[in-house]
Image (spheres, helix red, strand yellow):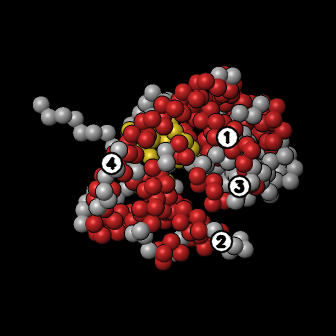
Amino acid sequence: MSSPAPARRVLSGMRPTGRLHLGNYHGALRNWVELQYQYECYFFVADWHMLTTGYEDTARLQEHVRDVLIDWLAAGLNPGVATLFVQSHVPEHAELTWLLNAVTPVGELERMTQYKDKSQKVESVPAGLLNYPILMAADILLYRADLVPVGEDQIQHLELSREIVRHFNHRFGTRFFAEPQPLLTAASRIMGLDGQAKMSKSLGNTIGVLESPEAIWEKLRPAMTDPARKTRKDPGNPDICNIYQLHKQFSTPEQVQMVAEQCRGAGWGCLDCKRVLADNMAAALAPVRERAAALKANPSRVHEVLAAGARKARAEARRTLDDVSRIMGFLPPAI
């Protein structure tokens, strides 16, 4: 009897920029929760990637890292199934990044869209801003990941990782690294409460996953709706209403249909629509809030998860680095 094929490996990360909001939750995390039972998954808190964005709140970085993990666990990531760890707890990420610097052309880094955009907004461009796509490639290749969950806006970075694989394999006459493939997800793009851009902490248009029912209502009440609907008696167009799109995430299909009918027929005002959404949001997120509160009260559990994840991740990363060092011709350490 032949042995079963090994599970394909998935890797993804998230920067510790603050508590989880609905954009993070529906745009990535809910998808991760499903993926962990389909693939061998490695999910990491990308704290080193914070260095390229000029973060200043160093006093709270550790707290933010722990909060990210609490949010992940509360949302359903299972450390008994997936490997959860902090990027900076696995120094092999930096080691492989340096080695990959040796095979990555500067011209390809300078063509990256995000580099072009961000470098124009700073007076002095740090080298890390140019090189951080190499760190992203190292994140992926260190664990020999087969698949990387990405949205359309991240395809360019993944393609650079694939290009780095080609450069490395050609330079050293090997097929050691396989080109990681995109795992295009059906993740929802959640618009912010302003109706103008996707949810973003920097734009202040978010609803936090752990916010109280009262806070959810206070944020939803002034949120943008169909701009053509001036009064309650005006019929609306739910297809262009931001609140209606959120109903699709939190309301039952029957409720979504009712909302559309009440909007088009001017049976409801916008506040009626928002009130139903706020109640549905609060109910759907209640279990997540409860689990997060329990984890916050048990910091030793968070520490255990991070320690176990780092041990497993480092063991895998070290195997990759040993093979890469051998391929590149380095003398093995004497100790």
Which of pointers 2 and 3 lies earlier in the amino acid sequence? 3
Q: Which residue is mark 1?
A: 62
Q: Amino acid at mark 3?
A: Tyr
The furthest residue to the left: 1
- The percent coordinates of residue 329 (x first, y second) are 29, 61
91 vs 330, left or right, is right
Which of pointers 4 and 2 lies earlier in the amino acid sequence? 2
Which of pointers 1 and 2 lies earlier in the amino acid sequence? 1
Q: Amino acid at mark 4?
A: Ala
Which of pointers 3 and 1 lies earlier in the amino acid sequence? 3
Instruction: Report how far apart the C-alphas of labels 1 and 2 lie in the structure.
Output: 26 Å
- Where disc 4 sits, the SS reads loop
Asked if residue 239 shows in the view, the reply is no
- The percent coordinates of residue 130 (x first, y second) are 56, 69
Instruction: Report how far apart the C-alphas of labels 3 and 1 lie in the structure.
Output: 13 Å
Instruction: Report how far apart the C-alphas of labels 4 and 1 lie in the structure.
Output: 35 Å
Q: Which residue is mark 3?
A: 55
Circles 1 and 2: CB distance less than 8 Å? no
Q: Which residue is mark 2?
A: 125
Which of pointers 4 and 1 lies earlier in the amino acid sequence? 1
Q: Quadrant of the N terminus?
A: top left
Q: Which residue is mark 4?
A: 334
Q: Amino acid at mark 2?
A: Val
- Where disc 1 sits, the SS reads helix
Residue visible at 82% across and 31% down? 214
- The percent coordinates of residue 251 (x first, y second) are 64, 35
The image shows residue 71, relative to residue 44, as above or below, that is above
Q: Residues within 10 Å of mark 2 (few under 14, many from 20)?
A: some
Residue visible at 53% across and 29% down? 305
